[in-house]
Image: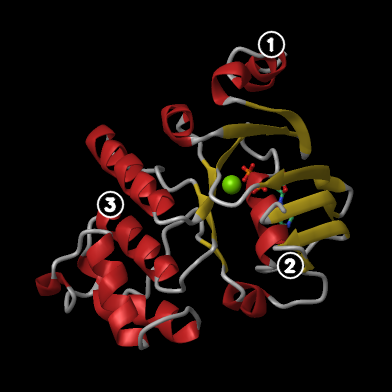
Amino acid sequence: MPLLTVESASKSFGALRAVDGVSFSVEPGELFGIAGPNGSGKSTLFNLISGIPFGPDSGRILFAGEDLAGRKGHQIARLGLVRTFQRETAFDTLSVFDNALMGATYGGKGPVPEERSAEALAFVGFAPADFDRKAAELSVYDRKRLMLASALALSPRLLLLDEPASGLTKPEIEALIALIRRIAATGATILLIEHVLTVLLALSQRLMVLNEGSLLVLDRPDVVVRDPRVIRAYLGD
Ligand code: ADP
Ligand code: MG
């Protein structure tokens, strides 16, 4: 059974069909990439799947076979469907540790929240000496790592990552790719929206391209990047 099934999901803002009848499914353990020009509906699709801040106008989202209709975003997160945002989010006035603890207290499985936070922070490479630093003092990359730790502290079965590579330098992007690989190796299923194509090519097993709210192509990444429809969508016509 797929871990995630999206059936003809749609969302409009006034006359704009931001997501227009999109259907696909994701297998357990898969690393599934999502690309598309700016404004093609990628982040809105994550909103619909996570219920944060809203679900679809029509269509269905099934997580592990369960219809998510009528569930609030926090209830969906507690089921193990966890999203991150395009702008890295951290509580600036809180410490690194307390940021992760916000995630861990909210949901997740296993040891007590404090242990789970420490584990998640160590997993993304923070040393215990960093735990007391204020989030506001961190570099862009360290804030990304913190955002990932806060998500991991929720013990996600399905992790939705929205453009995690944005704003990073080339070496930082390489480090991020390695980190996402390690997260995938724990068995988490990952949906990855990315603007940086090298990241999607390095990581995705399948790659979906959205254009103007609709699914344009879904295939192996090496096949997708050679598809004339994809090239046209990116270059415009
Ligand atoms: P992407 O992430 O692919 O760049 P988005 O999903 O953010 O695209 O946006 C898709 C379209 O929906 C864009 O035209 C955007 O302006 C519009 N949109 C997104 N969110 C809202 C919103 N809350 N209210 C109105 N329009 C929105
Ligand atoms: Mg977006």
Q: Is residue 222 left or right of residue 173?
A: right
| Residue 26 position in % (x across, y down) | 66, 47
- Identify the residue under disc 2: 54
- Mark 3 surroundings: few (<14), some (14-19) or many (≥20) residues within 10 A: many
On the image, the x and y values in percent for residue 234 come to: 62, 21
Q: Is residue 99 visible?
A: no
The image shows residue 210, relative to residue 224, as above or below, that is below
Residue 141 badge? 3
Looking at the picture, tell me which residue is in the foreground, 31 or 228: 31
Residue beneath disc 1? 228
Does label 1 or label 2 sit earlier along the sequence?
2
- In the depicted structure, whether residue 105 falls above or below residue 227: below
Task: Tell me what residue is drawn at x 58 percent, y 78 percent.
Answer: 78
Amino acid type at image mark 1: Pro
Q: Residue at 65%, 68% (x, y): give it.
A: 52
Determine whether 97 is above or below 33 in the image.
Answer: below
